[in-house]
Image (tube, rainbow, N blue to C red):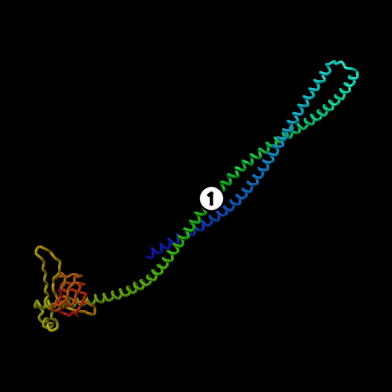
C-alpha cells in the first residue's frame, strides 16, 4: 500500500509543478501580450493621428489646386478677351487703312473752302486715329505683357500642379499603406484578443485543475495519515503477534518434548503389555497388573464389494489425557491406518462428549489435539 501512496504523491507533486509552471508561463505570456497590445494601441493612435493630419494636408492641397485652377481659368478667360480685343483692334486698323487708301484714290472736285475744311477735318481725324492707334498699341503691348505673365503664371501653375499631383499621389499611396497597416494592426489586435481570451480560459481551467488536485492532495494526505496510524496499529499487532508466536513456539516445543516423553512412556507400556500378553514376562505382569489395566484394541474396516475406500472406521480408547497441554493419547497408530489430520469423536456410554484431531502417529499409538470437549475426557473413553 505504501509504494502506491508514494507513487500517487509523487505524481501529484509532478502534476502540481507542471500546473504551476504552465500558470507562470501563461501569466508571463499574458503580460507580454498586454504590453504588445498597449504598444500596438499607441502605434495605432499615432498612425490614426498621422492619417488624419495627412488627410487634412491633402484637403488643403486639393483646395490650393482648385484655387489655382480657378485662377488659371480666369487668366485664360482674360487672355481670350484680350485676344479678342486685339483682333478687333487689328481689324479696325486694317479697316481704317482701307478707308484711307480709298479716300486717297478718289479725286473729288472740291471748292477751296471745302478743301480747307476737309483738310482740317482730315487732320483732326488722323490725329484721333493716331491717338487711337497709340492707345491701341499701348493696350496691345500691355495685353501682350499680361499674356506673357499669364503664360508664365500658367506654366508655374502647371509645374506646381505636377508637383502637387505627385504629392497627392504620394499621399494617396501613403494613405493606402497606412490603411493596410491599420487593417493589419486591427487583425493583429483581434488575434491577440482571442489569444488573451484563450489564455484566460486556459488559466481558469488550470486554476480549477489546481484546486481539484489540491483537494485530492488533501484527501490523500488525510488517507495517508489514517494509513500511517493504521500501520502503527498493525505494527503493534504484528509485534504482539510475533511475541505471541514466540510464546506459542516455546509452548509447542515444551508440548513436543512432553509428548515425546509421554509417547516413549506409552511405547514402553505398550511393549510391556505385549510382553504380558505373550506370557514371557509373567512376573512383570504380576507387578503391573494392579496399577495398569488397558482395554483391548478393536480395529474394524468395511468397504462395499468391488470398491476401494480410505474412510477410517477403526475404534479405540484414550490411553492418556493432558488437559493442561490440551492433548490426549489413543491406542490407534499408523498400523491401523491413522494419519495426521484425522478427526475422531469421543464417546462415553454411546454419548458424544467431544472431538479430537490427530497431530502425530506411531505404529500403535497416536497423539491427538482436543478440538471440542463437552464433558471432561477421561482414560478409557472410546473413540471412533
Q: Which residue is mark 1?
A: 190
**Nearest the camera: 319 or 79?**
79
Q: Residue at x 37, y 70 (%)?
A: 230
Would you say 328 lies left or right of 211 here? left
* The N terminus lies in quadrant: bottom left
Quarter of the image for residue 273 reads: bottom left
Left or right of 291 in this view: 207: right
Query: What residue is shown at x 57% (from left), y 48% (from top)?
Result: 185
Q: Secondary structure at mark 1?
A: helix
> Count the marks: how many?
1
> From where the camera sits, is residue 267 visible?
no
Residue 250: image quadrant is: bottom left
- The quadrant of the rendering that contains the C terminus is bottom left
Residue 7 image position (x, y, % from top left): 41, 62
Left or right: residue 232 compared with residue 95: left
Q: Is residue 17 above or below residue 190?
A: below
Amino acid at each position: 500500500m505504501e509504494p502506491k501512496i508514494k507513487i500517487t504523491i509523487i505524481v501529484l507533486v509532478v502534476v502540481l509543478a507542471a500546473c504551476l509552471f504552465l500558470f507562470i508561463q501563461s501569466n508571463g505570456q499574458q503580460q507580454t501580450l498586454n504590453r504588445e497590445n498597449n504598444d500596438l494601441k499607441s502605434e495605432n493612435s499615432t498612425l490614426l493621428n498621422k492619417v488624419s493630419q495627412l488627410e487634412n494636408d491633402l484637403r488643403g492641397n486639393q483646395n490650393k489646386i482648385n484655387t489655382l485652377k480657378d485662377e488659371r481659368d480666369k487668366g485664360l478667360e482674360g487672355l481670350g478677351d484680350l485676344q479678342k480685343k486685339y483682333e478687333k483692334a487689328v481689324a479696325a486698323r486694317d479697316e481704317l487703312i482701307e478707308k484711307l487708301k480709298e479716300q486717297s484714290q478718289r479725286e473729288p472736285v472740291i471748292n477751296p473752302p471745302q478743301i480747307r475744311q476737309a483738310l482740317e477735318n482730315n487732320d483732326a481725324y488722323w490725329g484721333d486715329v493716331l491717338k487711337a492707334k497709340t492707345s491701341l498699341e499701348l493696350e496691345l503691348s500691355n495685353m501682350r505683357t499680361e499674356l506673357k505673365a499669364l503664360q508664365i503664371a500658367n506654366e508655374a501653375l502647371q509645374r506646381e500642379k505636377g508637383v502637387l499631383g505627385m504629392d497627392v499621389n504620394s499621399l494617396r499611396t501613403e494613405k493606402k499603406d497606412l490603411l493596410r497597416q491599420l487593417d493589419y494592426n486591427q487583425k493583429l489586435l483581434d488575434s491577440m484578443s482571442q489569444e488573451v481570451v484563450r489564455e484566460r480560459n486556459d488559466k481558469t481551467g488550470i486554476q480549477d485543475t489546481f484546486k481539484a488536485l489540491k483537494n485530492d492532495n488533501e484527501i490523500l494526505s488525510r488517507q495517508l495519515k489514517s494509513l500511517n496510524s493504521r500501520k502503527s496499529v498493525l505494527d503493534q499487532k504484528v509485534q504482539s503477534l510475533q511475541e505471541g508466536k514466540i510464546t506459542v513456539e516455546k509452548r509447542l516445543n515444551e508440548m513436543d518434548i512432553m509428548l515425546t516423553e509421554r509417547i516413549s512412556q506409552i511405547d514402553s507400556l505398550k511393549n510391556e503389555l505385549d510382553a504380558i500378553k505373550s506370557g514371557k514376562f509373567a512376573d512383570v505382569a504380576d507387578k503391573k497388573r494392579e496399577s495398569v489395566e488397558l482395554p483391548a484394541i478393536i480395529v474394524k474396516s468395511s468397504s462395499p464389494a468391488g470398491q476401494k475406500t480410505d474412510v477410517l472406521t477403526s475404534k479405540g480408547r484414550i490411553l492418556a489425557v493432558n488437559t493442561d497441554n490440551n492433548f490426549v493419547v489413543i491406542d490407534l497408530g499408523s498400523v491401523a491406518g491413522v494419519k495426521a489430520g484425522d478427526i475422531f469423536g469421543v464417546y462415553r456410554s454411546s454419548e458424544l462428549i467431544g472431538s479430537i484431531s490427530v497431530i502425530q502417529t506411531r505404529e500403535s499409538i497416536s497423539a491427538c489435539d482436543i478440538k471440542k470437549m463437552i464433558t471432561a475426557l477421561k482414560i478409557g473413553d472410546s473413540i471412533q
